[in-house]
Amino acid sequence: MLRIGKFGFINNFLAYYKLEKEGKYEIVEADPKTLAELFEKDYVDYAPVPSYYYLKRKPKRHKFCVASDGEVYSVVVVSKGKKLGEKIAATTKSMTSVNMLKIIIEENGLKSEVVQVNGSYREILKNYESALLIGDEAIKARMVYRVSMDIGEEWKDLTGFPAVFGVAVSKKESGNEIDENVLNSVRWGRKNLDVVVEEASRKFRLPEEFLETYFEALIHEMGKKEERGLREYEELCKVHGLL
């Protein structure tokens, strides 16, 4: 049975909902950075990986992605107070958004410094005024702390294009077939949003209203705008010495 990676976050719940129920593949859940490591070691045959990892390695890429054309809700900088901290602690689970944040700070002339640290958001915010968080931790933290920046929204404001946080890659010919099956699962999830939202609400104990807004904000299929957003990210990473 082929192994395919899945971001172990709510952001892949809709996309993989039907696929997992079909049981055709062995699903390996991990955070984006770990999935890139598993892909590197040939442990998974196909996986979404951080866009930054893709740009450094350039493996075979597919159409499935994790992106947003504006607010993304789960890639955010939260703060304990009204001001952005002089140092923003970024979770070590992040590869793509940490570099997006660095670009946003420099392009907007902000004075904050980004430092990567380990720990849960509660641990991080004991020592820092602001923190960049991704995935489910970001969703939990935004319910408690003030959102200083939504990286999807900031990226759209800066570049005019979607923020592409993750892209699907593979090393085998089977990657094309897997990708089409994943995209079919995405399309089914979109058509049956009420079913997906109801189950996600039970599983993650989050309001259905928020989950509906969240799932509708996520983009899971690369189009022309997303391709342009990814190219823009690559160019700005090079301009700022990050690639």
Image (spheres, grey):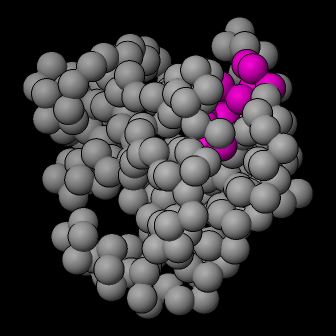
Whether residue 132 sits left or right of residue 154 in the image: it is left
In-front residue for pair 56/77: 56
Q: Is residue 67 above or below residue 188?
A: above
Percent across and percent down for residue 213 are 45, 75
Assess whether residue 56 is covered by the magenta stretch: yes
Q: Is residue 145 visible?
A: yes
Q: Is residue 10 above or below residue 85?
A: below
Q: Residue at x 79, y 29 (%)?
A: 59
Quarter-wise, where is residue 170 in the image?
A: top right
Percent across and percent down for residue 2 are 61, 48
Assess whether residue 93 is covered by the magenta stretch: no
Percent across and percent down for residue 126 are 11, 26
In-front residue for pair 139/2: 2
In-front residue for pair 209/82: 209
How many numbered marks have been drawn onto this rendered protein structure?
Answer: 0
Whether residue 168 sits left or right of residue 11 in the image: it is right
In-front residue for pair 52/19: 19
Range of residues picked out in magenta: 46-58
Q: Residue at x 60, y 88 (%)?
A: 191
Percent across and percent down for residue 209 are 34, 82
Residue lying at the far top of the rendered structure: 241
Q: Residue at x 36, y 38 (%)?
A: 133
Q: Residue at x 46, y 28 (%)?
A: 34
Whether residue 164 sits left or right of residue 180 in the image: it is left
Q: Quadrant of the C terminus?
A: top right
Residue lying at the far front of the rendered structure: 1
Q: Is residue 70 visible?
A: no
Quarter-wise, where is residue 122 in the image?
A: top left
